[in-house]
Amino acid sequence: MLEMNKGFKPGFLWGGATAANQLEGGYNEGGKGLTIADVSPGGKIRMKLLRDDSYPLEIDTANYTYPNHLGIDFYHRYKEDIAMLAEMGFKTFRMSISWARIFPNGDDAQPNEAGLAYYEDVIDELLKHNIEPTITISHYETPLNLVKSYGGWKNRELIGLFEKYARTILERFANKVTYWMTFNEINTGVMGSFFTLGMRNESVNNNFQALHNQFVASAKAVKIAREINPNVQMGCMSIYATMYAYDCNPVTAAETMEKNRMFNYFCNDVQVRGEYPTYAYSFFAKNNVTLDIQPGDLEVIKENTMDYLSFSYYMSTAHSSDPAHSEGVQGNFFGGTKNPFLKASEWGWEIDPVGLRIALNDLYNRYGVPLYISENGLGAIDKVEADGSINDTYRIDYLQQHISEMKKAVEIDGVDLMAYTSWGCIDLVSASTGEMSKRYGFIYVDLDDEGNGTLERSRKASFDWYKKVIATNGEDL
Ligand code: BGP
């Protein structure tokens, strides 16, 4: 008999997501080398600066601050933090391993044992609390040396170096950790993101070459993981923004389709279906992209596709072909036409819970593999009241609305959803601004943009709310 899903499946992975460079701190401790995140200053001009290739990739404390050097000091406080996540009932914690804690220069002969031991302790601490780690192998943390001496991901040598790094951590942890993701938001590489590719202002050709190299590196990591432990679950990770045609002009719809497939589908197509989609050939022809594809590359991609697809979802975007509607909005990586039906966060990211249900349907219908929402949440400025409480009802509203739509996708539409990890479950440094004041957490960290504060942790109103959501497996929102 055909039966509809009744709520989220048993064992649904509720939790939160983080990245090493945004929360650990200890940027030069335990033998760690520098990564691209360590030379990215804080402040609203961060992204602009990093796009400018005259900005030196050096630490210049006379002129800039670097909030992620301290992060929220998770490096030293992880036990306390994990205990608080356990109190909320977390089933999974998405974290990343910083490549430069394992290979400080990215190309060292031997791994740094102190780095491996640190992650082993964190993983063991999570498991002690029955929290399954989900590990991102590369989250905007390419070792700086690989950018300076090798030119970033356009250089094929990074494939072998990544393979060695991935093998090292997988050999150590793949028997303890089931859930893995290879590259965070890999499709931001389509837009030439420095954080993803370790390259700035390069040609479209080089951006796609770098992505090709990451596809091969990712597939090799999947292969190694399965050889070590056939039970691992390997996922890709893309940023997804539901994309609407602004009007019903077929020309707008066709343009939206083109934009949608290069931004939202391309990387998933390669990593989940295992081959370059045919529409990419015409994109490459139009943009004079000729890839250096070596013998064996396409085979390794084909043979090592992903078990699940994960994506971040913060906002949707609209496209208009009419200059009269060209009023632009700039979201995280996607810009577009202002959508008159939606409100935006203080940073201009258009809030669209229904768009999440559409995203889940779209991706599940296209790929038919389990989906993992690896990031979602509201960046906001929180106010600490005189009595120390933080009443982040706006955050509860945002999450409640998104989880409700997610539930419809599961119950009504039959989407196979395995996990939901809300971004920045404990306040951490923002990726786009490099500041603390854009907060996402259920747990408040007393630290400001200038690095002042006690680093003390406290529970926001959303803490108890999320605890209840998890305890009822998403029934009580
Ligand atoms: C995603 C990144 C995260 C995270 C998040 C929120 O693009 O994967 O690292 O930071 O966005 O962005 P921000 O911190 O800029 O608000």
Image: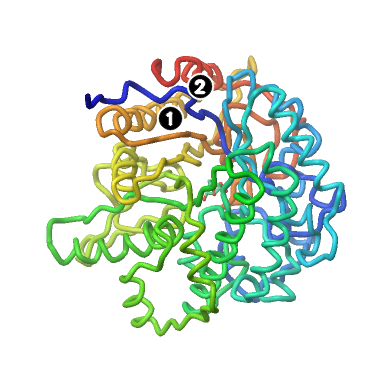
Q: Amino acid at mark 2?
A: Tyr
Give how far across and how far down residue 353 sits, in percent: 34, 36
Q: Is mark 2 within 8 Å of ligand 1?
A: no
Among the 4 quarters of the image, the one containing residue 118: top right
Callout 1 crowding tier (Cα within 10 Å): few <14, some 14–19, many ≥20: many
The reply to whether discs 2 and 1 touch (Cβ–Cβ < 8 Å) is yes
Quadrant of the image occupied by residue 158: bottom right
Q: Which numbered disc covers residue 466?
A: 2
Q: Nearer the viewer, residue 365 or 325?
A: 365
Residue 470 in percent (x, y) is at 50, 20
Quarter of the picture holding the C terminus: top left
Q: Look at the picture and state if 127 lies above or below 107.
A: above
Q: Give the residue drawn at x 38%, y 32%.
A: 402
Q: Which residue is mark 1?
A: 399
- Image vertical order of residue 443 relative to residue 174, above or below: above
Tell me which residue sits at (36%, 29%) in the image. Answer: 401
Task: State the residue in front, 291 or 200.
Answer: 291
Mark pair 2, 1: CA separation: 9 Å
